[in-house]
Image (cartoon, helix red, strand yellow):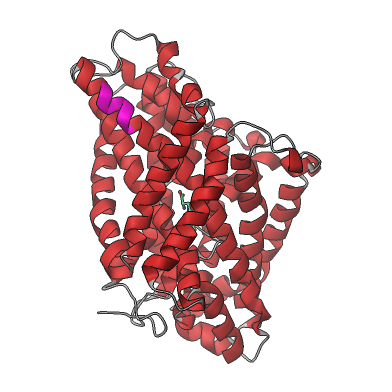
Amino acid sequence: MAAASKTTGEGWSSRRAFVLAAIGSAVGLGNMWRFPAEAGANGGGAFVMFYLLCVLLIGLPVLLSEVVIGRHGQSNAPESVRRVAEESGKSTGWALLADIGVLGAFMVLSFYCVVGGWVLYYIGVFLGDIFTTGIVGGAFQGRDPAEVEALLPALFGNGALMLGLHVAFLAITFFFVARGVSGGIEWVATWLMPAFFILFVAITFYGAFTGGFDEAVSYLFTVDFSALTGPVMLAAVGQAFFSLSLGVAGMMTYGAYVGRDVNLAGTSGIIAAADSAVALLAGLCIFPIVFAAGLEANAGPGLMFQSLPRAFQDIPFGSVIGLLFFVMVFFAALTSSISLLEAPTAWFKDRFRMPRPIATGIVAGGAMVLGGFAAWFFGQPVPVVSGIALFDGQDVFSVLDTATSRILMPIGAIMTSLFVGWVASRRLIDSENGLSGGLHHTWLFLVRWACPLALVVILIVGIFPSIV
Ligand code: PFF
């Protein structure tokens, strides 16, 4: 089945390619880095349970809505929304929802590639370690644990290195997106996602024998309802969104390349299930290793980049396992950054009728500059936003993260669910979504009521955190 979008002439060569690319978009730093850190910082089991609930009741319905719009519109995200609105006899002003999304994707891309750069750095660190101390025994032999943990702050203090790594990661992303949907994006997804899964299962299996597995299982799955506070719930919803790549036009863009014979509801279910399974397994991969080394779960963002390398000191073949771990994270991050670059690229390409490589270059160039600021001035508060409570004291990196996850992503998702639930023609949506009977009614109820209401609360609390 070759499915080329009517507008772009591009498309996935098969359903499998779409599933892999969409899972590739969903599975990324959000699963491997953010999920364990958030779960650890928010008390474990209660967060995990609420996160799964959010994926099912909010994430999945919005995901299906995004791909439905994309496939029907067969174009870049704003144009797809415009077409669906026009065919439904409604205002094409709704395209604004996807314009916001495209902007959001560009902003996420900018800081995402900075973190991608850190992953490249650790690949280099473990490679260097293999060459200097060999593969037998733990990683970083003869080095003080504090020295290993100090690698991350040292990197953060080196603006030029951070910038270089960011540009390198972005350049790799550019290379594949410039080659097109079936030639570049699909190629990466079909090779790297299976490679990712093999490495992932192998390392998790290894982690199961390091001694901390039982502790990790009870940490992640013992639910203490009293721990379910407002901030914990908020963190869980935000994580579900980020992880499923929602609210920033990414899934809408990928939906435009899907063939008509693909059942979108079933496929969205597979994507959400795979993404959640990887997040849970990431917990079961990272925490046993961390616990076995006697380290704390609540190390936050430093969990993957500080605690884990430190934990690799104590395990056999630590440097090889460490290298494989970061290569695996690199694969996951790359397939996500590709989807982040693709959403604005598709828009530029269609809007200004440009050849794909030029459109890709313009977007990547912009992200290089914006992310470049985030990398170079990492840790330095931005003076212009200091008066705004939400951003007070944050550096460029955190401003981008906060602005997208707390504002743009919820707004994009609220508008998507309202648009699909209330504005677009029922006949049109129902002919795309692949649902029938009770499931269809449930989905409609969720996109009409549950998602917008829950998301409005999230948006308000996200902007005014002092409420909870
Ligand atoms: N879902 C990705 C992750 O979990 O790392 C991040 C992401 C990719 C967010 C693509 C948004 C997006 F459009």
Residue shown at the point (49%, 82%) measured from the top left: 73
Reply above or below: 150 against 436.
above
Q: Is residue 250 visible?
A: yes
Q: In the picture, residue 358 is in which quadrant?
A: bottom left
Reply above or below: 323 against 106.
above
Residue in front for this viewpoint, 138 or 118: 118
Reply above or below: 390 against 69.
above
Reply above or below: 103 against 324.
below
Report the number of numbered marks.
0
Q: Is residue 468 visible?
A: no
Residue in front for this viewpoint, 294 or 83: 83
Indicate the position of residue 446 as horizontal and vertical percent values.
61, 68
Residue shown at the point (31%, 34%) measured from the top left: 325
**Quarter containing the N terminus:** bottom left
Residue in front for this viewpoint, 114 or 467: 114
Magenta residues (range): 123-128
Indicate the position of residue 381 as horizontal and vertical percent values.
68, 34
Residue shown at the point (43%, 15%) measured from the top left: 294
Residue in front for this viewpoint, 301 or 208: 301
Indicate the position of residue 436 as horizontal and vertical percent values.
47, 80
Indicate the position of residue 240 as horizontal and vertical percent values.
54, 51
Does the magenta-highlighted stretch encompass residue 328? no
